[in-house]
Image (cartoon, grey):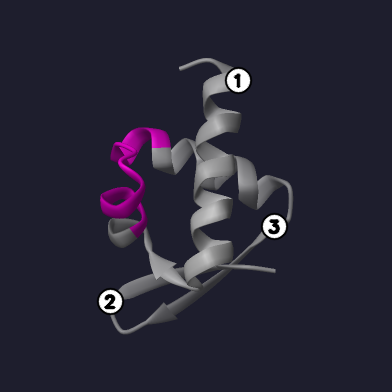
Amino acid sequence: MSEIAIGKAAGKIWEYLDKNGEASVSKITKETGLNRNDAQRAIGWLAKEGKLNFETQGRSELLSLK
């Protein structure tokens, strides 16, 4: 996956979280149509940029925008 494709996937996740609020990685991948690997790469990109909050609830990790 190219850097441009990762950036586009990151944009898709950012837009999803902006519209829908916090969500699990499973929900994000299901509702954005991204495969799990691409979603993980994009989440890493957003985390590196300091754009995400991570919260553990039970066995789930929820992501939200900062």
Q: Which mark is residue 51?
A: 3
> Which is more foreground, mark 1 or mark 2?
1
- Which quadrant, please, contains the C terminus? bottom right
Residue range corresponding to the magenta coloring:
28-38
Q: Which mark is residue 4?
A: 1
Q: Residue at x 32, y 49 (%)?
A: 29
In the visual, does 53 lie left or right of 33? right
The residue most toward the right is 49
Q: Earlier in the sequence, mark 1 or mark 2?
A: 1
Is residue 1 positioned above or below 54 on the image? Answer: above
Q: Secondary structure at mark 2?
A: loop
Q: Which residue is mark 2?
A: 59
Q: Residue at x 48, y 36 (%)?
A: 41
Q: Which mark is residue 48?
A: none
Q: Secondary structure at mark 3?
A: loop
Amino acid identity at mark 3: Lys
